[in-house]
Amino acid sequence: MDQGNTAFVLISAGLVLLMTPGLAFFYGGMVKAKSVVSMMMLCWGSLALVGVLWVLFGYAISFAKSSSATYIGIPGWFGIDTASLGLSAETAAALAPSESAYPGLAFVAFQATFAIITVALIAGAIADRAKFGAWMVFAGIWATIVYFPVANWVFNFGSNPDRSDAGWLIQMGVIDFAGGTAVHINAGAAGLALALVLGKRFGFSKGITQPHNVPLTLLGVALLWFGWFGFNAGSELAADGIASIAFINTMAAPAAAMLGWIIVEKIRHGKATSIGAGSGAVAGLVAITPACAAVDPVWGMLLGLISGALCALAIDLKFAWGFDDSLDVVGIHLVGGIVGTLFIGAFGRDVGFFFGNDFSQLYKQALGAGAVLLYSFALAFVIGLIIEKTIGFRVKAEDELAGIDTVVHGEEAYAFGNDKV
């Protein structure tokens, strides 16, 4: 085993795991003060539940082996065979998407963190009004029948040299280096579905709630950006030149996206806000995720600038179309993921039509994005609707208006001035 590559993969896994607590801060700062505990617990609950499910059967589904094309991902076994993982080069090749000298369990750990944060991302669409228990039921079912199969489509490169046992989007030639489809489009589509199922918050309109703690949100952005270097560069699974390209793109694209977002804010509203700057950085991170190894840094910055501007405009779709996506999961993750995925077909190295190639890669990218979007949206809507009609997904009206932290969790985020202190 190559200790350098092993360390690289394990450190990257740790960085990506940090992104979920970072997401909790990012989301938590943007909700009202009486809902911040609830919002953060939706993220922490995802970490707990999906982390367990991944070990029990998530990895088995996501990286199932088959002699033919794998469309859904049928588990060949339950759990993870720790007795055989990583003991031979043959085993390592069978468990990782590329031939790298690191233990198979390192790859298992790395991919677990992707599953965790994808589920947590969805929670931002239903902030201020979701029951924690209902969310946990949804998270477990959605991870099992949506995320794990889609990860198989996108991340399972199989063990055969001709990729005949890889996920069907890989076989088709879709390029998604670090999860623009499996993570961001997947989560964004599910967030849209749940926003429709749960309905609008009371008094839904522009400015319904302002971020209660801007520094908390910016701390979340910082942790997300820091962890995203493991997310993107780590997806190479080796400390090499491709990882370096992904790393510099993960720095440059969000920086450009931040500029794109605040320029739009300044033109439209006369002020460039810190929340806009942070949201712009996240939009750029989302967009560069599928393309971070497929575009050169100058084109990565162009992608960042475009995605920052487009996502800044897209967050108003919820007011135009009448769905309440509380923290802009649709406007940032769904739109940003689509933009980044399609950008490869135009400006991808050796495949983009801008460089004299045909439109075949753009077609593949569009088909991959569309397949994940429709699959995730349809199943998330059905799962959410069943939960709402049975155990109930949304809290009572009076609890929502009062703030759901004390009702659902028996805690308050801030106790300043409380006589109990």
Image: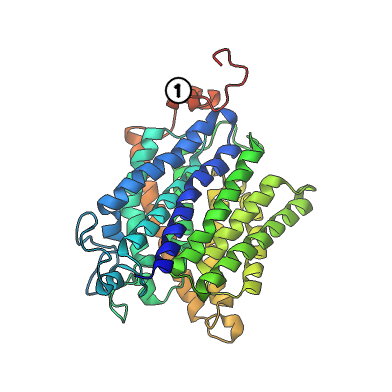
Provide residue 18's location: percent of width, then percent of height: 48, 49
Q: Residue at x 36, y 34 (%)?
A: 133
Secondary structure category for the residue under label 1: loop
Quadrant in which residue 69 is drawn? bottom left
Residue shown at 45%/74% (left/top)? 364
Image quadrant containing the C terminus: top right
Say above or below: 210 vs 304.
above
The quarter of the displayed image where residue 161 is located = bottom left
Crowding at dot 1, Cα within 10 Å, few <14 / some 14-19 / many 20+, comes out as few
Res. 326 visible in picture = no
Task: Report if residue 235 is visible in the image.
Answer: yes
Left or right: where 11 falls relative to 306: left
Q: Relative to 396, say whether 57 is above or below.
A: below
The residue positioned farthest toward the right in the image shown: 270
Nearer the observer, 364 or 110: 110
* Tag 1 residue: 410
Q: Position of residue 316 (x, y in %)?
A: 63, 49
| In the image, farthest residue toward the bottom | 356
Q: How is the image coloured?
A: rainbow
In front of the other: 278 or 385: 278
Q: Position of residue 322 (x, y in %)?
A: 56, 44
Question: 223 or 43: which is nearer to us?
Answer: 223
- Give residue 157's quadrant in the image: bottom left
- Would you place residue 118 above or below residue 76 in this image? above
Residue pictured at 33% horizontal, 40% vertical: 137
Q: Quadrant of the N terminus?
A: bottom left
**Amino acid under label 1?**
Gly
**Residue at the image position 70 percent from the left and 59 percent from the top:** 260
Q: Is residue 208 left or right of residue 186?
A: right
In the foreground, 140 or 228: 228
The percent position of residue 144, horizontal first and vertical second, equals 31, 51
Left of 56 or right of it: where is 7?
right
